[in-house]
Image (cartoon, rainbow, N blue to C red):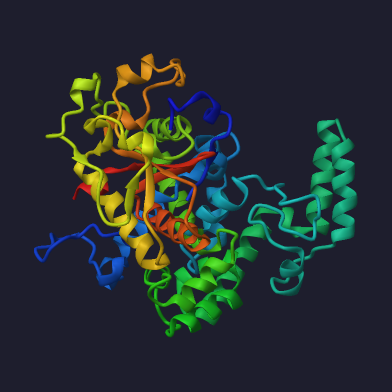
Amino acid sequence: MRRRPLPALLALVAVAAVVLWLLARGEDEQPGRLAEKAGGVSAYDAGQQQEFEERAAAGLAHPLFEKSPGGALATARRVAALRPLVERAAGDAWDPDVLEGIVFLESAGRPDATASDDLEGAAGLTQILAQTGSGLLDMRVDVAASKRYTRRLARATSPRRRAALLAARRRVDERFDPAKALAATVRYLEFAKGELGRDDLAVVSYHMGVGNLQRALRAYGDEDVPYAQLYFDSSPAEHEAAWRVLSSLGDDSSTYLWRIRAAQGIMEQFRKDPAKLAERQRLHAAAPSAEQVLRPPGTPRFAEPADLRTEDLAVVEGRGLRLSRTLAAAPAGNRALRPAALAVLRDLAAGVAEVSGTGPLTVTAASRDVRSEDEDPRFDVEAPPSMHTTGYAFDLSRRYRSPAQARALQFWLDRLTALDVIAWVREPAHIHVTVGPRAEG
């Protein structure tokens, strides 16, 4: 988000953030809409697995654009250069696009990538742990020798000397050999598929581990389900035991498959339309969340206070909501949102209340107009108008009524993000949420 009060600009924290929210309403659902269930938690529909996965990939793509070394476009170029090796390693056993997605996400296409200075940890093109490489994947991994060559590489300045040291390190630590790392990754995926019975579960286990995933599946009560079902059908209100296993991992394991799918999408777009990928990268870089992707430049804005007409907006009210004192005293137009945004806010508040059993969420900001922001000394006039001037953004206070309320809000923010319905960012005193077009039908 841009055009925030100047002190807040110094402390913005991006959150990337992947169950269907209450998008389908009434009994006359349209084809392609996702089904809903009572209690604010939406049902997984096996017939719409692909739609769930596509939404999750879109909703969780932002970190790939934000964190990829040099940007997603530069990473895509590096990964694309490895495609012949990827296809050779995948053979007939595995989908090369999936393997390519793993390369994108794990190392950004850098064969010498390491997770830390400790080479016992993840290293190489596909970030294989030393113990996994030598103990499970039949790789040569001599950590002590690898460390020696790594130290020499840090001191080497001659390109010829560096090339010789890199080659020597690849011989003693095959994780740094791109062809051997890719072949080992395929061996792992085949092993995991044998244990778990499904390609998608095998991919999830590459980050989560087979044991953790089996524990989540047992908690769900069915070990032969698509990962989309396990993920989207588990919540604090439904299949809670499985949700607790997934949420307890705390290292993005539960969203790994969606980020792999996002990487696959980036690579596909790189090959088909690199200019469009460059534009996506620009939009992702324009704000600390994906809000500019959901509501790109050209989205209608309210230019003047008189444009905040209540016939175009709906005043914020509803179960589980209250307005801050400042917002409650503001004109009606400033206390309102576009109907689709208000519908998401109401459902979000109802879901948080359902899960946490606590009082209302406090809304601290809704719609504003561009002129008022320009004239307000609290705002940075050099920045573009904020998303509040579109009517699709709102702020929620971070002063929670209980830890349970904070946890419930985090759950719903993450799940709405995983459905590509919202983008959000945590600010010092507020959660800023932008509602995307999927909320409109």
User: Residue at point 45% right, 76% down?
Assistant: 240
Residue 430 appears in the rendering: yes
Given residues 418 and 177, the one toward you in this image is 418
User: Residue at point 87% right, 35% down?
Assistant: 156
User: Residue at point 38% right, 73% down?
Assistant: 237
Question: Does residue 413 sit above or below 135 in this rendering?
Answer: above
Given residues 381 and 284, the one toward you in this image is 381
Horizontal and vertical percent for residue 226?
Answer: 39, 73
39 relative position to 106: left or right: left
Question: Does residue 154 sit above or below 149 in this rendering?
Answer: above
Given residues 399 and 111, the one toward you in this image is 399
Question: Does residue 220 sit above or below 338 in this rendering?
Answer: below
Question: Does residue 275 sit above or below 118 in this rendering?
Answer: above
Residue 96 appears in the rendering: no
Say which quarter of the image contains residue 366: top left
User: Residue at point 39% right, 21% down?
Assistant: 384
